[in-house]
Image: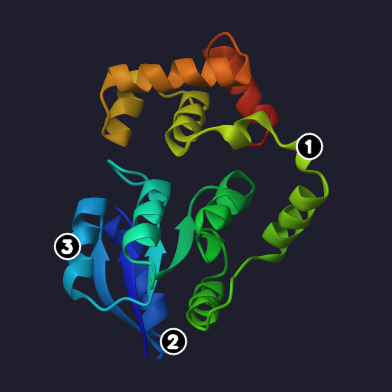
């Protein structure tokens, strides 16, 4: 039996993932969490071979949690299951130490397959991610500007491009409006853009929204 812990801030999504995995007969859900703080408490007692981790979490985001788990609990393998398209985060997550990446819109059967493969010590990537990895190795000089953004900067970019106000973004990410303004300023500087309209155009042109 493969022991799995789920970390996603949406209870309904956790329920769907849990049902899919339990139905496989080879996976046991030993704990659930909606944030890093809850996850720390769960992992103190729950056995965990594979952590199924969302990226878009309140407080500390998925990539920050990924780094923490890899450093403090290196025996736990991590599967990222996110709403973000693969071309935005998959390679970044794999480079950060994740063992696999799946989009939430994908086939549920892939979830079971991914966990079984990761538990066996292998990486799990979809054909689309495999192609992106090959392209990134073949043409590293073509790295996009947004590939250098931090997780919070990327989240801020996507939310601004989706039409959200800074106050709403701050509430979503559980940050202060001042901190979000700092991320926005860094975005403009790193991407050599002047305002929110240009950020939105950049995001659309690069398929981020």
User: Does any portion of residue 171 appear in the rendered image?
Assistant: yes
Colouring rule applied to residues: rainbow
User: Does any portion of residue 165 appear in the rendered image?
Assistant: no
Instruction: Work out whether mark 1 precedes mark 3 in sequence or the reverse, and give the earlier one.
Output: 3
Q: Which residue is mark 2?
A: 24
Depicted 144 relative to depicted 20: above or below: above
Mark 1 or 2, closer to the camera: 1
Disc 1 on helix, strand or loop?
Answer: helix
> Residue at image x 53%, y 25%?
161
Mark 3 or 2, closer to the camera: 3
Q: Which image quarter holds the N terminus?
A: bottom left
Residue 50 at x, y percent in the picture? 40, 73
The answer for how far apart the CA atoms under marks 1 and 3 are is 42 Å
Q: Which residue is mark 1?
A: 141
Crowd band around label 2 with a 10 angstrom C-alpha radius: few (<14), some (14–19), many (20+): few
Q: Which mark is residue 41?
A: 3
Disc 3 on helix, strand or loop?
Answer: helix
Is residue 120 left or right of 203 when viewed as pictured? left
The answer for how far apart the CA atoms under marks 3 and 2 are is 27 Å
Residue 154 at x, y percent in the picture? 50, 34
Residue 125 at x, y percent in the picture? 63, 66
Crowd band around label 1 with a 10 angstrom C-alpha radius: few (<14), some (14–19), many (20+): few
Residue 3 at x, y percent in the picture? 34, 81
> Residue at image x 29%, y 19%?
177
Depicted 91 relative to depicted 143: above or below: below
Q: Which image quarter holds the C terminus?
A: top right
The quadrant in which residue 13 appears is bottom left
Disc 2 on helix, strand or loop?
Answer: loop
Q: Find out whether the residues at labels 3 and 2 contact each other: C-beta distance under 8 Å.
A: no
Quick one: which residue is furthest to the right in this view?
138
Instruction: Work out whether mark 3 precedes mark 2 in sequence or the reverse, and give the earlier one.
Output: 2
């Amino acid at each position: 039996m493969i022991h799995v812990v789920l970390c996603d801030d949406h209870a309904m999504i956790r329920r769907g993932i849990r049902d899919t995995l339990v139905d496989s007969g080879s996976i046991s859900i030993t704990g659930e969490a909606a944030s890093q703080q809850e996850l720390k408490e769960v992992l103190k007692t729950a056995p965990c071979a594979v952590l199924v981790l969302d990226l878009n979490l309140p407080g500390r985001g998925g990539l920050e949690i990924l780094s923490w788990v890899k450093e403090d609990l290196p025996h736990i393998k991590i599967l990222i299951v996110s709403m973000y398209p693969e071309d935005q985060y998959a390679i970044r997550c794999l480079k950060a130490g994740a063992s696999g990446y799946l989009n939430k819109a994908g086939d549920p059967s892939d979830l079971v397959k991914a966990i079984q493969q990761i538990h066996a010590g292998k990486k799990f990537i979809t054909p689309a991610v495999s192609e992106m990895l090959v392209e990134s190795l073949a043409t590293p000089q073509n790295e996009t500007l947004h590939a250098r953004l931090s997780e919070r900067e990327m989240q801020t970019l996507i939310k601004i491009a989706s039409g959200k106000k800074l106050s709403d973004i701050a509430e979503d990410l559980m940050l202060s409006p001042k901190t979000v303004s700092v991320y926005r300023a860094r975005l403009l500087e790193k991407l050599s853009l002047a305002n929110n309209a240009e950020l939105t155009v950049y995001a659309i042109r690069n398929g981020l929204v």
